[in-house]
Image (cartoon, helix red, strand yellow):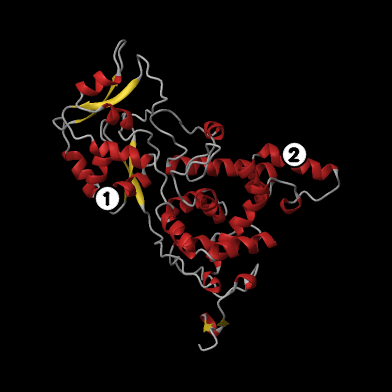
Amino acid sequence: MADGTRLAAGGLRVTPLTVEEIPVRPARVLKLDLTRDANDIWDRIRRGFAMPDLESDLVIERQTFYINRPTFLKQSFERGSRYLYFIVDEIEQRGLPTELALIPMVESNFNPLALSPSRASGLWQFIPSTGRNFNLTQDKWVDERRDVIASTRAALDYLEYLYEMHGDWHLALASYNMGEGAVGRAIRRNREAGLSTEYSALRLSVEATNYVPKLQAFKNIIARPELFDFELPFVANDQHFTTVEAPQGLDLATAAKLAEMPLDEFVALNPGYNRPVISRSGQSLVVPIDRVVPFRLRLNQLNDGNAHWKTYQLKRGEDLGSVARRHGLSVTQLRQINGLNARSRIDAGMTLVVPDGKLDPAGAVEAARVLNTPAR
C-alpha cells in the first residue's frame, strides 16, 4: 500500500514496526487450531508454550535488537533446524513447556561447538562441573557437553531439578544461567528485606537479569512473526536424525562421505568427539533420517581390509617424530589429529590415534580442524 501498510491475516492493517514502536505483547493475529497437526516445528512449539509471559522494558529492548538483525536470526533458527524436532520431542515426553526449546538460542545460537570464556560448552552451555554433576562424560576422546542427544537430556534433567526447587520457571531459568546458589542468595536477601522474591524483583548479575527477557523476546517473535515483519525459516515437524552404531577406527571424514554430506554438516550432528576418530567400540554416529539406509549399506561394505585408525601407546624413549614416521604422518598431522599443541605434555604411556595401514590422513586432519572451529 502507498502508506507502507499491508493487510495481515483477517484483514488487519499492519505497519512494519520501527525500533521505538515494537510492543511488549502485540495482539495475536494467528490463532492455533489444535484440531489439526502442527504445520511445522514452530507451530508445534507455539502449542506447547506454558510459561507466564514476562513484560518489561528489557524484553522490548531484546526484541528490538533481534528484529534489527534478521540475518542473524534466520541463520540461528536455520542452524537450530537440525536439532529442534529432537529437543521438542524430549520436552513433550516430560510434559515441560516448549519455551525450553529456545534456551539453546539464548545460550549458544544453536552452535554445538560454542565455547564460552568460562569454558561452558555445547548447545546448552554446560560448565565442566555441572556437566559432571549430570553425568556428561568429558575426557580426551569425547565431550558429551557438546553431544546433542546427551546434553539435551542432561539439560532437561537440570531444568526439571531447578523448577522443583523454585516452583517458578523464571527463577529456574535464572538459576540455570547464574547457578542455584547465587539465585538462592538473591531470594534470601529480598525475603529478609521484606521485598518480593519474584524474578523481576531480584538483584542478579547483568547476564541473569537479561536471561529471561532474551528468551521472552524469542518467544514473542516465534509466537507472532508476522507482527514483527519477520518470516521464520520453514522447519518440518519431522524426525531429522537417528543414531547408527559406529565401527571402531572409523574417522568422521570417511563417515561424512558415506553419508554423502559435507564434513561441517556431519560434524554439526556429531560434535561431541574430541578426536576425529571413533576410538572405542559401542559408540554411535548421528545421521539424517533420509540418509541412514544408504549410510548403513556403505558402512557394511567397509571390511577389515580397509585401512582404518587405531590407538597406540607411546613407549618410553619414543617421541612424536618417530611415531609419526612409522605411521606415514608428519609430526604436525599427528599433533592435529590428537589435539596436541606446543604446550601439550608428551609422556610415555599416552594414547595416540594413528593409521592402521596406509591411508590419506587429510580427512582426519580436516575433521579435527572442524571440531575445533566453532560454527558461524
Residue 55 in view, yes or no: no
Relative side of 91 to 334, left or right: right
Numbered circles on residues, count: 2
Say above or below: 326 vs 217. Answer: above
How far apart, in angstroms, are the residues tagged by discs 1 and 2? 49 Å
In the image, farthest residue toward the left: 305
Residue 261 in view, yes or no: yes
Residue 118: x and y in percent read: 56, 37
Inspect the image, locate mark 2, and give the three-letter code of the amino acid beneath it.
Arg
Kindly identify which residue carries mark 1: 261
Pick whichever, 19 or 224, lies toward us.
Answer: 19
Rendered residue at 31%/52% (across/down): 289
Residue 174: x and y in percent read: 65, 47
Rendered residue at 58%/62% (across/down): 65
Kindly identify which residue carries mark 2: 185
| Rendering quarter of residue 216 | bottom right
Inspect the image, locate mark 1, and give the three-letter code of the amino acid beneath it.
Met
Classed neighbour count for the residue bearing mark 1: other residues with Cα under 10 Å, few (<14), some (14–19), many (≥20): some
Helix, strand or loop status at disc 2: helix
Q: Residue 371 carries which label?
A: none
User: Which sits earlier in the primary sequence, circle 1 or circle 2?
Assistant: 2
